[in-house]
């Protein structure tokens, strides 16, 4: 077992000076240990007498009964708590020194410091939440936009768990029926069973395909679109980054090669997160440092979800760049014809771009001086990546790579079932792949996971959660 019986404690709020700080304690001895350092307004150690789910006024005291802080204290007795254990929460003043003093008192009286995510891990191990809900807790804490928040809330409500659990129940029923028919053919008829299973299996496959399809958009919506800004030196790459960010993030000069390293910035455009990389200007150069920057730019573009290729429309030396053509082939890409405010000096036209890169690639005329084309760019990005402006009310997106991989494995198993049915194989062959699909789906909700995976998942949580 990888569950620990000792009583744990941690500061659950940020370690900054604030009006209120919360220290959380969980375990069989949570109430007993906390009672040693708590007195009520009359000076009594009375914590054991309080009813569950009440909040009470009192003081934290040290070994000499000297008052350390005036507090409010919450009692949540097992099993009606977050961890299904006895839980106490001390609401103290939020000073760092005060909270550390209270924490040290708890440790001296028998608590130990909780590991990152240990409260939620205990909630999972004690059966209060499944693994999808546990991971949704972490996603909710780290949510960067409304989509992430709403999707995490749907997972916390059990939407994904219920969908996976329903699939598992249906698969289990069919496995049980096959086994019963093999063991007791007089009472269980397998005549035309392959037709029935094929219908069911097709339904399961469609459900999994829909969840997997949601994952690509879901992960991008949650984590952001990896966006590389590329182009020749002085085309306006750093200016574009600054315009998208709404502030000066990159140095802009008339000197070619100013940007030599990768500048990364998370930029929020409404409900969209762009993980923007401003790269060095792509050109042939003898400067060793600049050449490293060019190589990094090409590598960043290769790894990007979206490439913004910015071209100086006044460039008299503009020509077909084979390196750029190779980069944007089979990728989401948008070409920006920049410096269009210099109407008397325009040398590169939209038709020139289409003749080189094809008519399917979006081309936007822009100016970083008067911000022409920026709104159009934002709209094209939204249309390019997302099927809708907001998450449908009852729809769930898979935004977790671990869950996606398990779904893909389950789908592969169900496709093998389909092949077995189409090949008219005997029914006992079906159960092997059905069992594999059942197990892979169990990995998603935490019913088929080992200790190492549990430790890895919860180690990514913050302290006190």
Image: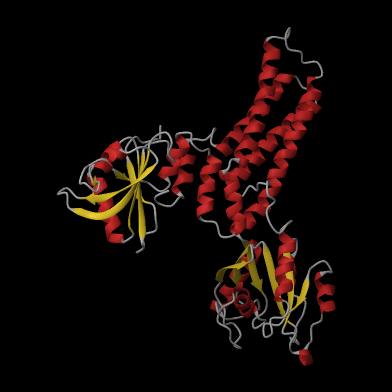
Task: Point out the image quarter for the N terminus.
Answer: top left
Quick one: 382 or 33, which is closer to the camera? Answer: 33
State the image coordinates of residue 117 (x, y, percent, origin top left).
43, 46
Quick one: 161 or 265, which is closer to the camera? Answer: 161
State the image coordinates of residue 296 (x, y, percent, origin top left).
59, 69
Quick one: 292 or 381, which is closer to the camera? Answer: 381
For this orientation, the residue located farthest to the top is 186
Left of 297 or right of it: where is 178?
right
Quick one: 281 or 191, which is closer to the camera? Answer: 191
For this orientation, the residue located farthest to the front is 42
Where residue 164 sits, quadrant-wise, is top right
For this orientation, the residue located farthest to the left is 64
State the image coordinates of residue 323 (x, y, percent, origin top left).
71, 70
Picture layout, residue 341 above or below residue 281:
below
Residue at image coords 30%, 56%: 99
Residue at image coords 82%, 78%: 350
User: How does the figure colour the protein chain or chains?
Assistant: secondary structure
Residue at image coords 20%, 46%: 43
């Amino acid at each position: 077992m990888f569950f620990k019986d000792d009583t744990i404690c941690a500061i659950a709020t940020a370690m900054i000076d604030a009006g209120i700080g919360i220290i959380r304690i969980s375990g069989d001895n949570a109430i007993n240990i906390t009672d040693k350092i708590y007195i009520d307004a009359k000076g009594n150690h009375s914590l054991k007498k309080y009813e569950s789910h009440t909040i009470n006024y009192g003081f934290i005291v040290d070994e000499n009964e000297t008052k350390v802080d005036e507090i409010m204290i919450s009692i949540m007795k097992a099993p009606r708590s977050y961890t299904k254990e006895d839980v106490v929460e001390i609401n103290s003043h939020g000073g760092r020194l005060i909270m550390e003093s209270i924490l040290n008192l708890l440790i001296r009286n028998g608590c130990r410091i909780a590991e990152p995510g240990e409260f939620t891990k205990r909630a999972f191990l004690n059966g209060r939440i499944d693994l999808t809900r546990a991971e949704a807790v972490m996603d909710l804490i780290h949510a960067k936009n409304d989509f992430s928040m709403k999707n995490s809330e749907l997972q916390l409500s059990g939407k994904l768990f219920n969908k996976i659990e329903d699939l598992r129940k249906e698969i289990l029923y069919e496995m049980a029926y096959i086994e019963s028919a093999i063991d007791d053919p007089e009472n269980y008829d397998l005549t035309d069973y392959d037709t029935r299973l094929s219908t069911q299996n097709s339904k399961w496959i469609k459900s999994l395909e829909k969840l997997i399809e949601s994952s690509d958009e879901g992960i991008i919506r949650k984590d952001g679109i990896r966006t590389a800004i590329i182009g020749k030196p002085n085309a306006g790459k750093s200016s574009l980054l600054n315009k998208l960010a709404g502030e000066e993030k990159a140095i802009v000069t008339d000197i070619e090669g100013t940007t030599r390293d990768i500048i990364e910035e998370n930029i929020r455009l409404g409900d969209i997160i762009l993980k923007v990389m401003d790269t060095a200007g792509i050109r042939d150069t003898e400067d060793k440092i600049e050449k490293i920057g060019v190589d990094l730019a090409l590598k960043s573009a290769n790894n990007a979800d979206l490439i913004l290729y910015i071209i100086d429309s006044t460039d008299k030396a503009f020509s077909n760049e084979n390196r750029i053509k190779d980069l944007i082939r089979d990728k989401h890409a948008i070409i920006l014809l920049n410096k269009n405010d210099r109407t008397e000096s325009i040398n590169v036209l939209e038709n020139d771009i289409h003749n080189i890169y094809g008519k399917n690639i979006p081309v936007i005329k822009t100016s970083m001086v008067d911000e022409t084309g920026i709104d159009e760019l934002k709209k094209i990005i939204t249309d390019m990546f997302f099927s809708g402006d907001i998450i449908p009310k009852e729809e769930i997106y898979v935004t977790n790579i671990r869950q996606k991989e398990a779904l893909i494995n389950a789908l592969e198993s169900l496709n093998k079932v389909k092949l077995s049915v189409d090949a008219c194989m005997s029914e006992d062959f079906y159960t092997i792949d059905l069992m594999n699909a059942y197990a892979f789906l169990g990995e998603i909700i935490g019913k088929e996971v080992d200790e190492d995976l549990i430790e890895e998942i919860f180690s990514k949580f913050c302290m006190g959660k």
